[in-house]
Image (tube, helix red, strand yellow):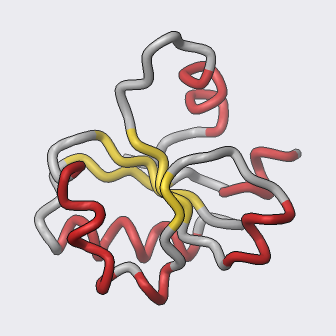
Amino acid sequence: MDATIQELKERETEATKDYVLLDVREDYERSEFNVGGIHVPLGELMGSLDKLAPHKDDEVIVYCRSGKRSAMAAQLLTQSGFTNVRNLAGGMMAYLA
């Protein structure tokens, strides 16, 4: 199930975060606007699974610019054994709207 922008913004205000944000955009996109989280560009995702392994059973919300790359990343993570991966619907375009 996709995560919504409204849900993310509401959860950002919580004192303790019970989820992991994963940004799969390119470096230049992240430098333009950044809401935080772990940064692993989509093209490097499969080679970075060791870095993400501690979060295999955590809720991972993946985001990109529009939601397309993060949907692919979510699928790859799920196929790699991550148990609770969600795509941020609309990505940063929707976040900034």
Instruction: Name the residue furthest top.
Output: 15
Please give left or right for residue 60 compared with residue 66 in the image.
left
Residue 83 position within the rendered picture, expressed as x and y whole percent measured from the top left: 16, 51
Residue 9 position within the rendered picture, expressed as x and y whole percent measured from the top left: 66, 27
Residue depicted at 30% across the width and 40% down the height: 59
Name the one closer to the observer, 76 or 34. Answer: 34
Q: Quadrant of the C terminus?
A: top right
Please give left or right for residue 38 compared with residue 79 in the image.
right
Residue depicted at 28% across the width and 61% down the height: 52
Please give left or right for residue 37 compared with residue 84 in the image.
right
Q: Number of marks in the image?
A: 0
Please give left or right for residue 54 compared with residue 23 in the image.
left
Q: Is residue 73 above or below residue 13?
A: below
Instruction: Name the residue furthest front.
Output: 51
Residue depicted at 43% across the width and 24% down the height: 17
Residue 53 position within the rendered picture, expressed as x and y whole percent measured from the top left: 19, 60
Q: Is residue 61 above or below residue 27?
A: above
Q: Is residue 86 above or below residue 9?
A: below
Residue depicted at 32% across the width and 77% down the height: 48
Q: Is residue 76 above or below residue 18?
A: below
